[in-house]
Image (cartoon, helix red, strand yellow):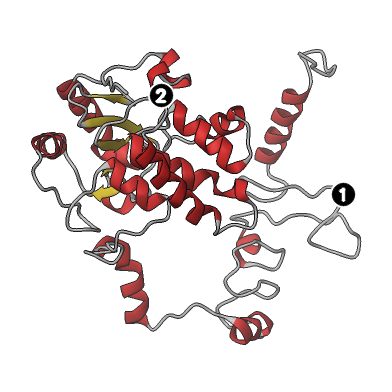
Amino acid sequence: MGIKFGRQTNFGYLTVPEDSKEPYPAEVEASLREDAAAIIARYPQARSALLPILHLIQSVDGYVTGRGITLCAELLDLTEAEVSGVATFYTQFKRHPNGEYTVGVCTNTLCAIMGGDEIWEAVSEYLGIGHDETTEDGKITLERIECNAACDYAPVVMTNWEFFDNQTPQSTIQLVDDLRAGNPVAPSRGPAQVRTFKEVSRVLAGFHDGLADEGVGAGPASLAGLEIAHEKGWEAPTGASWAAQADAPTTSGAAEGQAPGRPEVTPASPEAAAGTQAAPKATDPSDEASGPTAKDEDAVTDVDSAANETRDKVYEAGSTGDDGEEDTK
């Protein structure tokens, strides 16, 4: 089976190469079937094993091949269309040859403003590839990621889902250079060395590599809140202690009718009394906090403020046309 890396077409995202449908060598297929049987045994229904078996296929082929889809369908009593539908839904499953290392640059809000966009532009230009494309040597697949779930270390780059924190364009270019040169590369947190895409895919299939507890799991930025809580002696309320707190009488620091720790404004709250934020009117004659004219007051004003009247006019304008008739466009 030939492997062709490089730029991908839109057509390539939705199909697999014809040569990827060639049968597995007998010994490879036997090993796959043995591992797949171990995965299937974890689930009450065989079809539930589809996701990890797709990762297993990638651990052997480097992407979801045509022959891999056929094997999954047979093992799980699914159609090839059902398997393909799942394989094309999740971005961790590749329908074309993937690089040895998947480098994902986060360009979501926080990482972007901290330099993620600059990192992406610099590395993409340096490697000469775009999103979900692979270098000709088959080493690097570049991805533009929506979130790497490590905002406290923005901007963040991931390599085969290992974290590289507080990156710059220069450090990320050095990262891809080291990966392409075969130099050992250690992530900011996690194992002492980044594993290959195939090795990580086998872990995602459920076969542990023994490295889960290697290296630092959480850095100082992630633990800052916990350390402050320990210093202050704060503890999260649980069970009976939480119920007792909820039923406790109002303390001197809380307004009458306002539960401790709850920010809503009631007619008796200091904000309403001072006219800095409006409390809702009553819809139920027996309930002062609700009534036919009750509204969610967005403005920091008195209930009868002209600002609220203006807001109501805006609402009316949005639901009717200029002539007052309902706008159905």
Q: Quadrant of the N terminus?
A: top left
Residue drawn at x 63%, y 31% is 79
Q: Which residue lies furthest to the front in this view?
A: 26
User: Mark 2 is on which residue type?
Assistant: Glu
Residue drawn at x 75%, y 47% is 295
| Location of residue 119 (image quadrant) | top left
In the rendered structure, the answer to whether residue 321 lies left or right of residue 179 reads right
Q: Which circle marks residue 22 in the picture?
A: 2
The answer to whether 301 is drawn above or below residue 107 in the figure is below
| Location of residue 122 (image quadrant) | top left
In the rendered structure, the answer to whether residue 1 lies left or right of residue 308 reads left
Q: Quadrant of the C terminus?
A: top right
Mark nearest the camera among 1 and 2 is: 2
Residue drawn at x 57%, y 37% is 74
User: Mark 1 is on which residue type?
Assistant: Pro
Element carrying mark 2: loop
Q: Residues within 10 Å of mark 1 (few under 14, many from 20)?
A: few
Q: Position of residue 281 (x, y in %)?
A: 79, 54
Q: Which circle marks residue 292 in the picture?
A: 1
- Counting residues from the start of the chain, the first of labels 1 and 2 encountered is 2
